[in-house]
Image (tube, grey):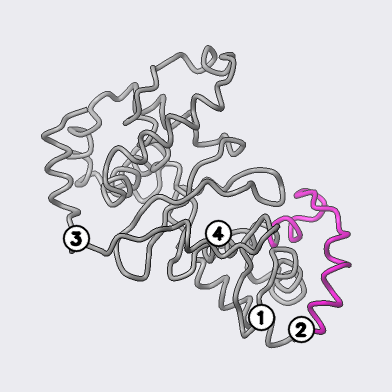
Amino acid sequence: MSTTALDALYTQVRTAAAPVVSLSGMDRRRDGDTFATIPVAGLELTVGEAAAALFETAAEDLALPVPSTDALYAALTAAVNTLGPTGIAEHTPEFEGLDGDPVEWPEVATCRRFAYRLALSFWYAGARSRPMTAGEVGAAVYLSSLNRYRAEVFRELPGRKLLLARAIHEGATAVPTETLIRLGAVMGGELGGADRDREREWLYKQALPDYHRRRFAFDLVRFDRSQPAPLVVRPDSGGYTIGLTPPPGPDGTWLRPLRAEW
């Protein structure tokens, strides 16, 4: 890793100093809740209630292309206005009884995943948050002290998920979050084909010069949605920071998008 290149990258992404925030005091989860509720139209919906509301009113419209979080929230707001608290209460038990098999009931799985995204977005009071992208997680692994292995060797290591979780946390906190976001966006373009911008790759390749390590780090996390990763948080006061690692979604996996889903 080139310190000079990283210093140059810091200069590019340097922003006005933002107030220091304590995320532990901003966690919106109620005692005993696994997920944060979703505040919408004066209600606080659970992930299950939000998924049921989306399923009843917007399942087909939201399938493709993958909507932004703002579009999801607008759809949920419209659903709440259409169904009202009573309608949501009536439909939720029936929806929760549906099989979530993505082959037989793709709309059910989709609505649950979208509701999970909204819960992640509203995890903290006074902030928005989202899952780390595959590129951001890959960049974090690259920046960590994790040794590079052959993929088949790493998969056989005892405790590999813990090793990888530690590497993700180490790398994600090794540089300013704004820098990690920049590196992750370019890595996602180079190795994942997400909006590749070759003009931005020169400095990125100076900062992360080893192609084989870049490929190793990205491939470890791109398709392994069973591997947890923390949230990226954007406080209303400005800047970005790394949040907690949330529980997995309703399907037992974490989100790992190629593009940032604010």
Q: In this view, does 106 lie to the left or right of 190?
A: right
Is disc 2 placed on a helix, strand or loop? Answer: helix
Query: Where is mark 2, residue-wise?
Result: 85
Instruction: Name the amino acid, label 2.
Output: Pro
Q: Are marks 4 and 3 in contact (CB under 8 Å)?
A: no
Q: Give the residue drawn at x 56%, y 78%.
A: 74
- Tell me which label, 1 or 2, sits earlier in the chain: 1
Q: Which image quadrant is residue 126 in?
A: bottom left
Secondary element under disc 4, as helix, strand or loop, is helix
The percent position of residue 144, horizontal first and vertical second, equals 35, 28
Magenta highlight on residue 110: yes
Mark identifier at residue 15: 3
Direction from residue 233 to residue 53 in the image, left or right:
right
Name which residue type carries label 4: Leu
- Tell me the distance, in whole angstroms, between the alpha carbons under discs 2 and 4: 22 Å
Q: How far apart are marks 1 and 2 (CA)?
A: 8 Å
Marked residue nearer the N-terminal end (3 or 1): 3
Circle number at residue 120: 4
Circles 3, 1 touching at the beta carbon (< 8 Å): no
Neighbours of disc 3 within 10 Å: few (<14), some (14-19), many (20+)? few
- Residue occupied by mark 1: 43
Residue drawn where x is 44% and y is 58% of the image: 23
Number of labels in the image equals: 4
- Magenta range: 86-111
Q: Do the residues labelled 1 and 2 touch (CB within 8 Å)?
A: yes
Disc on the earlier residue, 4 or 1: 1
- Note whether 235 is above or below 202 in the view shown: below
